[in-house]
Image (spheres, grey):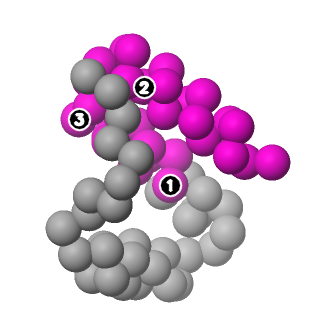
Amino acid sequence: MSLILSPNIENPDAFYQELTEAQRDLTDAEANAMNARLVLILANQVGSLEDLRDAIELAGATAA
C-alpha cells in the first residue's frame, strides 16, 4: 500500500477544529505530548511498517 497524498480527511475543517479545541487549554509541553500520543495511536491504526517508513520519510523531507 502506498501513502495517500491527496486530501483524504472526510471533513478537514471539523477535524482541525476538534484538534485545536482539544489543545486550547494545554501548555506547549502538554500539546506536544498529546501530539506524540496521537502520532502513536494513528501509527498503530495504520499498522504497516512500510507505510509508516514512507510517512516518516515524507514528513522529514517536508519539515525543512
Between disc 1 and disc 2, whose residue precedes? Answer: 1
* Amino acid type for the residue under numbered disc 1: Asn
Residue 32 placement: quadrant: bottom right
The N terminus sits in image quarter: top left
Residue that numbered label 1 is attached to: 35
Q: Which mark is residue 45?
A: 3
Q: Secondary structure at mark 2?
A: helix
x, y (%) of residue 56? 56, 30
Give the residue at x 81% y 48%: 64
Give the vertical position of 54 relative to 8 (above or below): above
Q: Is residue 52 magenta?
A: yes
Residue that numbered label 2 is attached to: 52
Hey, which residue is sitting farthest top in the picture?
A: 50
Dominant SS of magenta comes to helix
Residue 44 placement: quadrant: top left
> As rendered, which of 38 and 59 lies closer to the eye?
59
* Amino acid type for the residue under numbered disc 2: Leu
Q: CA distance from mark 2 to mark 3?
A: 10 Å
* Amino acid type for the residue under numbered disc 3: Gln
x, y (%) of residue 27? 64, 73
Q: Secondary structure at mark 3?
A: helix
> What are the residue bounds of the magenta stretch?
35-64
Hey, which residue is sitting farthest front in the picture?
A: 6
Give the residue at x 45% y 79%: 20
Between disc 3 and disc 1, whose residue precedes? Answer: 1
Please name which of the two marks, 2 or 3, marks the residue nearer to the observer. Answer: 2
Would you call the spot at circle 2 few (<14 residues within 10 Å), some (14-19), or many (20 or more)? some
